[in-house]
Image (cartoon, rainbow, N blue to C red):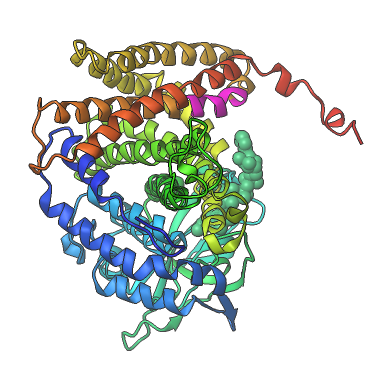
Amino acid sequence: MADTQSQYTAPLKDMAFLMNEMAATPANHEDLLFVLDQAARFTQKELAPINLEGDTIGCSLKDGQVSLPPNLKKAMQSYTQAGWMGISMPEEFGGQALPETLASCAAEILTSANHAFSMIPGLTISACRAIMAFGSQELKDTYLTKMVSGSWTGTMCMTESHCGSDLGLIRTSAVENANGEYSIKGNKIFISAGSQDASDNIIHLVLSRLKGSPKGVKGLSLFLVPEKLQDENGNWNKDNQVSCIGIEEKMGIHANPTCSMSFEGSTGFLLGEVNQGINAMFAMMNEMRLGTAGQGVGLSEHSFQKSIAYATQRTQMRSLSGPKAKDQEADPIIVHPDVRRMLLTQKVFAEGGRALSQFCSQLLDQSHEGDISKENAQLLDMLTPIAKGFCTEMGLESASHAIQIHGGHGFIKETGVEQLYRDGRIATLYEGTTGIQALDLLGRKILGTQGKSLMHFTKLMHKLCKENAGNEKQQDLLNVLAKYSKEWPELTMKIGGKAMKNPDEAGAASFDYLMYSGYVTLAYFWAKMAITAQALLDGDITPQDGELDKDFLEAKVLNARFYFERILPRALGHKSSMLAGMDSTMNITEKQFLSGY
Ligand SMILES: Cc1cc2nc3c(=O)[nH]c(=O)nc-3n(C[C@H](O)[C@H](O)[C@H](O)COP(=O)(O)OP(=O)(O)OC[C@H]3O[C@@H](n4cnc5c(N)ncnc54)[C@H](O)[C@@H]3O)c2cc1C
C-alpha cells in the first residue's frame, strides 16, 4: 500500500473482481490480468515516481517548441517502446487489439499515478478512433500506424478564446484547395499537448468552418492537420505552418502543456463529410469523456490510498470508545468515525465508479466490434455523461477528503494530496463541464429518446431485484434499489413535463438530475457487487480464478452497506432540489444579484 508521496499501488484485485466475476458472462481472464499486472508494474516504477517532479518542473516554451519535464519525456519513450500506446488498437495498425475492458483499467492506473502524463496517450488513442471511423483509407494508412506506435501523438483542437462549451461559435476557417486538400486558418486555445518534444509529429484534429458553411455546429467540419508534412524526399519534416504561440500558467497538470495554437494556412485533410464535423469530433469526444470518467475514478482511488496510509500511521487523540493503541500516546486517526466516513466515501466512489466504468467499457467493446444493439448504444450514450459528470465530481470530493484526512499537512505540498486536488480539478471542466454533461444527460440522452435510454437502465435494475428476490442478506439493499428504479422515471416525467412549458425548467433541474442519476447508478453497481461478493463468500458460486479472498469480499459487502446507508441518501436532497422548480433560481434579476454592493 502506498505510504509516501510518490507511491501508488494499482488496485488489481478489484479490477480482477470486475473483469472475472462481474462481467455479463463471468470467466477467468488470466491473460488480460497478466497484461494489466504489467501495466501496473510499469506505472508504479516509471510514472508514479515522477509525478511530483513533473508538477514542480512543469513545461517550458522556447522558440515555438514546448519541452516536457525531462523525466516525463523519457517515460513517454519507455511507454511507447514497450508498446502500451496501442494495446486496444487494431493489429493492422500495429496495436494489440485487446478489449476496452482491459484498456480502461490500464488507463485508470495510468491517470491515477500521473494525470499529466496520461493525457497524451488518452488524446492520441481517441484521435486514432476518430481517424479509424471517419478517415479515408489513405489517411488511415498514412497516420494510424505511427500514432498507434506512439512515435506520433494526437490532439483535439476545438476551443477558441470566445468559445468553449458553445462550439457553434468556432471561427477557424477552412478553404478547399484545387488538389482536394484544405487550407486551415485560425487560433485555438487550451490545446492539451498541442506542442511537446516527446513525439516526432503531432496530428491535430481541428474543428473548422468551411467558407460558405452555415453558422453554428451544423457548419463545422473536422480536419486532420499534421504539425509536419512529408517533403519531396519522403521525410516528415516539412513545416505545416502550425505553431504553438503560448502555454498556460495553470492550477495543476503542470507536466502537460496547455497550448495556444496558431494555424496559418496549414494543410488539412477532411475527416468525414463536410459540415458533419461535430459528429466526427463526437466520436473522439465520447471516448475522451469515458476516459475522463476514469480520471475521476483514478483520483478517488489515489486519494483513498494516500489517506488510508496516513490514517493508519498518524496518531491523534483517543478513540471515543476507549484507547485502541494502548502502547502509544494516542490512537491512529483511523479509529475516529469521522475519518472512517471520509475514507469509506473515497473507497465507495473509487470502486463504484470503477464498476460503472467497466460496464461502459463492455458496451464500448461491443460498439468497436460493430455489434452493439440499438438498446445498448442508447444505454452507453446515456451512461457517458453520468460517468463523466458524476465520477469527476466524486473524484474531486475524494481528493478534498484526502486533504482533510491529512489535516493541516494536507494543505502542505510535501504530502502530495494537494497536487492530487490541483491536477484532478480539470476533470470536471474539460471534455464538457459538469453543467454541460447535465444538460446532455437530461436533454439529449433522456428526454431526447423519450426516456427509452433510461428505461434500458431501469430494466437492468428491475432484473437484478427480480433475480435476487429471495436473497435475504441483501434484501434491504434491493428494496431500496427497486424504489429508485420506479422513482427515477417518475421524476424524469415530472421534469420533462415542466420543461415542455419552459426549457429553463430542465436547465434549472439538470445538475441535480445528473447527481441523482449518478448516485442511483452507482447504487445498482454496489448492489450487484454485494450480491456477487456474498455469493462467493457463501459458496453459491466459485471464484473464476479459484481463489477466495475473504477480507476483500467481506469488505465489498460492508462497503455496499455504507454506500446505501451513508451516501445514497444524498439522492433525496437532489430530488427535492430538482423538483423545486426554476423560480427561486431564475426570478432574481442581474441587478438584484449585485444589489448588496
Ligand atoms: C487544462 C485544460 C486543458 C484543455 N484541453 C483541451 C483540449 O485539448 N482541446 C480543446 O479543444 N479544449 C481543451 N480545453 C478547453 C475545455 O474543454 C474548455 O475550457 C471547456 O469546455 C469549457 O469551456 P470554457 O472554458 O470556454 O467555458 P465556458 O463555455 O465559457 O463556460 C463557463 C461556465 O458556463 C457554464 N455554461 C456554459 N454554457 C452553459 C449552458 N448552456 N448551460 C449551463 N451552463 C453553461 C459552464 O458549465 C461553465 O461553468 C482545455 C481546458 C483546460 C483548462
Location of residue 383 by image quarter: top left
- 234 relative to 101, above or below: below
- Residue 300 visible in this rendered orientation of the protein: yes
Judge by depth and name the residue closer to the eye, 15 or 363. Answer: 15
Determine the main secondary structure of the stretch shown in magenta.
helix
The quarter of the rendered structure image containing the C terminus is top right
Q: Residue at x 47, y 52 (%)?
A: 310
Q: Tell me how many marks there are.
A: 0
Task: Give coordinates of residue 570: x percent, y percent.
Answer: 51, 24
Q: Is residue 236 left or right of residue 464?
A: right
Q: Nearer the viewer, residue 268 or 569?
A: 569
Assess whether residue 513 is covered by the magenta stretch. yes
Q: Is residue 168 magenta?
A: no
User: Percent x, y for residue 495?
Assistant: 54, 15
Write the residue at 32% across / 13% down. 476
Seen in the picture, residue 448 relative to 400 is either above or below; the reply is above
Which residue ends up furthest to the bottom in the rendered image?
233
Name the quarter where the N terminus is drawn: bottom left
Residue 211 in view in this figure: no
Q: Which residues are magenta?
A: 507-517
Residue 102 position within the rendered picture, expressed as x and y whole percent measured from the top left: 23, 50
